[in-house]
Amino acid sequence: MPDKQEPGPDEGELVNLSQLAAELGVTRQWLHTLRTTDPAFPQSRRKPGSTREFWDLGEARTYYKARELRQGERTDLKAKE
């Protein structure tokens, strides 16, 4: 059985979290962090009667490209207490 759901008339290509991470070139853990902390992360979709979550690949790419990138904080320069 394929992992991808057939797109409906108003949906693009639907992928699971692992496939989405591979498409965006990031880890599943990073995507999980984004989806639980950023309210702008695209909503998941589910097949009727299923608990598996899928995301529209086009929506996810648009969201990821539009995100504001921030530099990480250097902890090695902080004064130690």
Image (cartoon, rainbow, N blue to C red):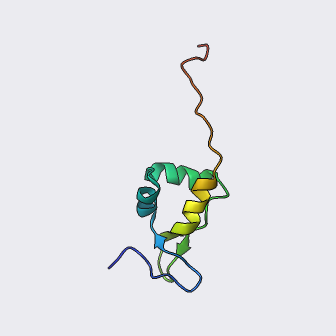
Q: Can you see residue 52? A: no
Q: Quadrant of the N terminus?
A: bottom left
Q: Can you see residue 42? A: yes
Q: Is residue 64 above or below residue 8?
A: above
Q: Quadrant of the C terminus?
A: top right
Looking at this view, name the residue that lies furthest to the bottom.
Answer: 9
Location of residue 43 in the rendering, given as x and y in whole percent from the top left corner? 61, 67
In the visual, does 63 lie left or right of 12?
A: right
Location of residue 29 in the rendering, given as x and y in whole percent from the top left corner? 46, 49
Picture mark count: 0
Looking at this view, name the residue that lies furthest to the left.
Answer: 1
- Kindly identify the residue that appears in the image at 41 percent across and 63 percent down: 19
- Kindly identify the residue that appears in the image at 49 percent across and 70 percent down: 54
Closer to us: 47 or 24: 24
Location of residue 61 in the rendering, given as x and y in whole percent from the top left corner? 55, 61
Q: Is residue 24 above or below residue 58?
A: above
- Kindly identify the residue that appears in the image at 49 percent across and 80 percent down: 47
Closer to us: 43 or 11: 11
- Kindly identify the residue that appears in the image at 51 percent across and 67 percent down: 57
Determine the image quadrant of residue 62: bottom right
